[in-house]
Image: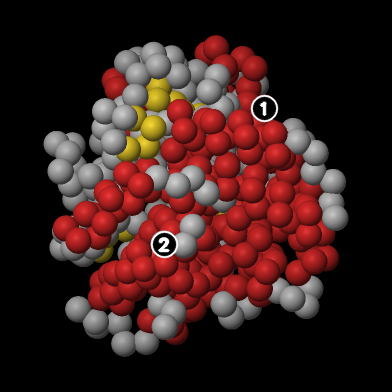
């Protein structure tokens, strides 16, 4: 423990080393491009020592925005043989080679934080970004809502929680027998025990093939895509983004029609993800209407979305007291818990930070502080890993990870 003697410097150095000129890769090797939500978190880290660079991170992300408003989950700014599936597999036609799906829309929220920090030049840069942030939000409202107002993910990668147990039933119903031959690259960079299984990976690739065949036409994919799950990550992130966009528009006097209505719809959607039997926010397969029965770290993003829940707060208290390194991505009491396998158990520092933002905003200061300190101990004790074993704290996945460094600088490492 505590072998990281100068974590501030180490964190800054990680961001600087992962900087590819205008955008930051999540980590060397495993993730060699710009990832959407990684970038939004990483910008917060830069904001602690280089505000201009923080803005640039978000501005670069939006250079990849499609004409219809969509902002892809990966921008392939340059070729890299070490990653699969690359631009040739996705077959997209945006301004920059990219994937055809999104990721949880946290950019508006993180950009608001940068703007509030930047009292000198913030307004001008925010004004330039605002229409783009709004266009992405509107694209999501148009294509991703279910009948209750919850926001759906159309690929496990879109929710950012690749192999979460939330998708197990939906994935099991999917046929991937005709996926064909392909070569995974992730398991040549990190331990395969820490990564999704082949069963899952076949389906990830099959879904890319289905999207590509439809030319990423969202209208067509509404009926063609076998995977459409209303998800707490997407729903809470979109609701929070709508609230932040509304505040920005009001403060800067920018037109942003419809946001109040969006917020009402999304609030109803968020409430529809409450699984009473489970006692938690949960995911719902829109094809079957079935809830997944998963308590994940995304369930705890309710406060981030401005949604209060006494029952989630009780759950959080128990988690903070009983799990050595909270918040686990899957409840350790549940049978599918796997301490090392990606989104099936491990603790993710950036998710903790977003949960912490929510707790703080809704006045649960004590819990926010507790979570922040525990996350700080985890990072200073075990380093800037992609994610951590919630029981032992041991680091897993990629090393020298940008968003973990950013979480340290912006939140967990602050006195
Ligand atoms: C991967 O390639 O594993 C990523 O999680 C996709 O976003």
In the image shown, does 158 or 360 lie closer to the viewer?
360
Q: Quadrant of residue 320?
A: bottom left
State the image coordinates of residue 58 (x, y, percent, origin top left): 66, 58
Callouts 1 and 2 close, C-beta under 8 Å: no
Q: Quadrant of residue 23?
A: bottom right
State the image coordinates of residue 307 (x, y, percent, origin top left): 49, 45
Mark 1: which secondary structure? helix
Left/right of residue 372 with respect to residue 48 in the rendered view = left
Left/right of residue 362 with respect to residue 184 in the rendered view = right
State the image coordinates of residue 167 (x, y, percent, origin top left): 34, 29
Q: What separation in Å lies between label 1 and label 2 (alpha carbons)?
A: 34 Å
| The C terminus sits in image quarter | bottom left
Relative vertical location of residue 244 with respect to residue 210 in this rendering, above or below:
below
In the image shown, does 404 or 301 lie closer to the viewer?
301
Callout in the foreground (1, 2): 2
Q: Residue at x 47, y 62 (%)?
A: 363
Q: Tell me, what colour scheme is on the image?
A: secondary structure
Can you identify the residue that label 2 sits on?
364
The disc placed on residue 264 is none
Instruction: Kindly give the residue lying farthest to the bottom in the view shown.
Output: 5
Question: For the residue carrying disc 1, how many other residues have a C-alpha within 10 Å: few (<14), some (14-19), or many (20+)?
Answer: few
Q: Residue at x 53, y 71 (%)?
A: 45
Q: Residue at x 42, y 56 (%)?
A: 355
Left/right of residue 342 with respect to residue 161 in the rendered view = left
State the image coordinates of residue 336 (x, y, percent, origin top left): 18, 37
Q: Is residue 376 visible?
A: yes
Relative vertical location of residue 278 with respect to residue 7 in this rendering, above or below:
above
Left/right of residue 76 with respect to residue 399 in the rendered view = right
Can you identify the residue that label 1 sits on?
142
Relative vertical location of residue 89 with respect to residue 359 in this rendering, above or below:
above
Q: Is residue 187 visible?
A: no
In the image shown, does 295 or 260 lie closer to the viewer?
260
């Amino acid at each position: 423990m505590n072998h990281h003697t100068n974590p501030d410097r180490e964190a800054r150095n990680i961001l600087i080393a992962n900087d590819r000129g205008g955008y930051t890769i999540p980590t060397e090797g495993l993730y060699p491009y710009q990832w959407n939500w990684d970038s939004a978190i990483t910008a917060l880290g830069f904001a602690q020592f280089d505000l201009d660079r923080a803005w640039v991170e978000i501005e670069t992300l939006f250079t990849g925005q499609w004409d219809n408003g969509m902002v892809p989950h990966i921008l392939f700014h340059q070729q890299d043989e070490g990653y699969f599936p690359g631009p040739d597999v996705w077959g997209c036609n945006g301004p920059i080679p990219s994937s055809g799906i999104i990721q949880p829309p946290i950019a508006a929220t993180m950009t608001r934080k940068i703007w509030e920090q930047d009292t000198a030049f913030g307004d001008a840069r925010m004004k330039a970004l605002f229409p783009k942030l709004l266009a992405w939000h509107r694209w999501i409202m148009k294509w991703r809502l279910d009948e209750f107002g919850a926001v759906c993910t159309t690929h496990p990668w879109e929710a950012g929680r690749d192999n979460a147990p939330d998708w197990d039933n939906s994935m099991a119903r999917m046929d991937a027998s005709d996926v064909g031959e392909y070569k995974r690259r992730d398991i040549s960079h990190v331990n395969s025990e820490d990564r999704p299984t082949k069963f899952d990976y076949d389906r990830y690739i099959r879904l890319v093939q289905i999207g590509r065949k439809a030319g990423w036409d969202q209208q067509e994919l509404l009926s063609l895509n076998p995977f459409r799950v209303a998800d707490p990550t997407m729903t809470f992130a979109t609701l929070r983004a709508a609230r932040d966009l509304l505040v920005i528009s009001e403060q800067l006097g920018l037109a942003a029609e419809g946001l109040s209505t969006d917020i009402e719809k999304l609030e109803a959607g968020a409430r529809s993800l409450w699984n009473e039997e489970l006692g938690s926010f949960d995911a719902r397969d829109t094809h079957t209407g079935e809830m997944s029965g998963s308590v994940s770290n995304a369930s705890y993003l309710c406060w981030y979305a401005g949604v209060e829940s006494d029952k989630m707060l009780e759950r959080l208290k128990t988690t903070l007291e009983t799990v050595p390194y909270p918040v686990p991505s899957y409840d350790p009491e549940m049978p599918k818990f796997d301490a090392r396998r990606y989104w099936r158990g491990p603790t993710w520092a950036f998710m903790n930070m977003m949960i912490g933002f929510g707790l703080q905003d809704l006045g649960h200061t004590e819990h926010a502080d507790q979570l922040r300190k525990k996350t700080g101990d985890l990072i200073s004790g075990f380093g800037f890993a992609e994610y951590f074993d919630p029981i032992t704290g041991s680091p897993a996945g990629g090393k020298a990870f940008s968003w973990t460094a950013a979480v340290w600088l912006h939140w967990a490492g602050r006195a």
